[in-house]
Amino acid sequence: VIVTLELDLGPVMASGDLSDGVDYAPLHGALVSTVTETKWTLLEGLAAALMECALAPAGIRAATVELVKVRPPLGSHTGPVTLTFRRESR
């Protein structure tokens, strides 16, 4: 799982105050809980749930979630498959 966040760094850069930025510790905890506390049947469902977590903190403009399935059940195909989802905040 790779989560990329797009945010406005202007406020935290101008103030130098961490409270004007994103607190990554609770966000990381929410992402880990989302992955580990539910048995996901579809990668798309997991991606949607991760996207909700990623876009929850104030100041996040957009997020990209990449999921890599190392051994997809695709018959003779043996390489990993990567799915990439991107969404802007509302």
Image (tube, helix red, strand yellow):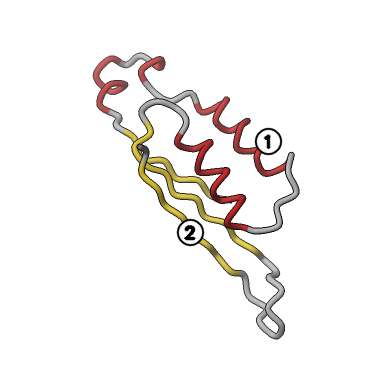
Q: Residue at x 70, y 52 (%)?
A: 40
Check the image and name the residue furthest to the bottom: 76
Side of 41 relative to 54 (left or right): right
Q: Residue at x 63, y 75 (%)?
A: 79
Instruction: Name the residue type under label 1.
Output: Ser
Which corner quadrant of the image does residue 81 belong to? Answer: bottom right
Secondary structure beneath dot 1 equals: helix
The answer to whether 79 is drawn above or below residue 13 in the figure is below
Side of 71 relative to 49 (left or right): right
Picture disc at residue 33? 1
Residue 64 percent location from the top left of the image: 44, 49
Picture disc at residue 25? none
Secondary structure beneath dot 2 equals: strand
Q: Residue at x 29, y 32 (%)?
A: 8
The answer to whether 24 is drawn above or below residue 36 in the figure is above
Instruction: Name the residue type under label 2.
Output: Thr
Residue 61 percent location from the top left of the image: 34, 37
Distance between the alpha carbons at the discs numbered 1 and 2: 20 Å
Of labels 1 and 2, earlier in sequence is 1
Q: Quadrant of the C terminus?
A: top left
Side of 1 relative to 11 (left or right): right
Q: Residue at x 63, y 30 (%)?
A: 29
Side of 29 relative to 8 (left or right): right
Picture disc at residue 84? 2
Count of residue discs: 2
